Image: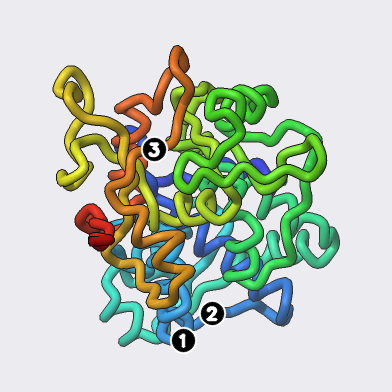
Amino acid sequence: MDWVERAAELRQWSKGAVRAPHKPLLLLYALGRFQREGDDGELRYSTVEEDLQRLLAEYGPPHRTSPAYPFHHLVSDGVWEVRTDRGAGSPGTGVRELRARGATGRLVPELRVALRREPSLFGRMARVLLDANFPPSLHDEVCEAVGLESAPDLPERLPGAHRQQRDRRMRDLVLTAYEYRCAFCGYDGRLGSVSVGLEAAHVRWWAFDGPDHVDNGLCLCSLHHKLFDKGVLGVGWGSPRSSGVESGGEAESGGSHRILVSQRFVGHGAAARAQVTELSGRPLIGPQPGTAPVAATHRSWHIEQVFRGDPRPAHVAPSSV
C-alpha cells in the first residue's frame, strides 16, 4: 500500500479555494506522537483536544472550528481508526459524544507497521501533507508544533493532486519587480552583491492554486514573509484612512495597495510597533512602474483564507510640531 499517495489524497471538505487543513493537521499530529512515543499510538480525544484546538487556531482557517470534525472524519481515509467504550467506530462529530464515550483514535495497524519498518515514511508523508496545505515558510514551524522531525526536501515529484512543477524563476522575477526591497518595510540588505533576507512570497498559496506569477507575489523580508503567511499582515486596497479591505475590480480607482495589520496581533515593544503595528495603512513599496501589481483575486483570497480577524485602523504618525 502506498501510504504517501494515501496522505496526498485525503478527502477534504472543499468549496472553491477554501482552506480546510483539519485532517492533515490531525494526521501530522498523530505521526508526530507515534514517532516520539511508539507503543500503539492511541490518543484519547479528551486528552489531546486542547492540542488539536491550538493547532487549528494557529494553522487552520481564520474561522473557529472544532477538532472533533477531523477526529471523526479521518477514519474514512483509511489511515485512522476510532474506538469508544462501546467498541470500534466513532460516535460522531460531536465534542460531547467523543468526550463522554471515551473516544480514542490512532493510526491504523497497517500504517503503524509500515512506519516501524520504514522510518523514512514519517518524513515522506509529512512532506506531501505540508506541500499540499501550507506555504514553505511554515513547514518547519508546523513540524515543530506537532512534534515531528523536519520533513526532508525531496527532489522527486510528489503524488496526488499537486503534481505541477514550481516555476523556479518566480523569486528572481518578483524581487526584480520590487527592486530588491521589502514591499512592507523597504529592507534591502545585501552581503556584497547578493541580497540577503529577501524572499518571494505567494499571496495566494501555491498549495491552493496560487500561480507562480508576479501578480501573485510580493518581495518581503524574512520577518514580514512569516507574518504575512501567519495572517498577521495582509494587503488591502483603499485610501490612507480606509479599512483597506474593499473588493477588487473596477471599483479600485482612487486608491492604492495598503498594508493590513490584524487587530489580533499584540506587541508592546518598540520593535513590534515599528515592524508591525505602525505599518497599518501604509502603501506598499513597489512594484516598479510597468510591472503587474498584486491581482485583486489573489489579494481577496489571502484576506478571506489567511488574514486573521479585522484590520487595525491606519496608523497616524504623531505630529512633530
Callout 1 secondary element: helix
- Give the residue furthest to the top: 290
Residue, x 41% and y 58% (percent of image)?
Answer: 60
Find disc 2 in the rendering and name its residue: 43
Find disc 1 in the rendering and name its residue: 47
Marks 3 and 1 sit apart, C-alpha to C-alpha, by 45 Å
Name the amino acid type tagged 3. Leu
In this view, the residue in front, 276 or 149, is 276
- List x then y, in percent, for residue 61: 36, 54
Name the amino acid type tagged 2. Leu
Mark 3 or mark 2: which comes first in sequence? 2
Residue, x 44% and y 68% (percent of image)?
Answer: 272
In this view, the residue in front, 165 or 213, is 213
**In this rendering, the label closer to the viewer, 3 or 1:** 3
Direction from residue 212 to residue 71 in the image, left or right: left
Asked if the residue at tag 2 contacts the one at tag 1, i.e. Cβ–Cβ closer than 8 Å, the answer is yes
- List x then y, in percent, for residue 240: 21, 42
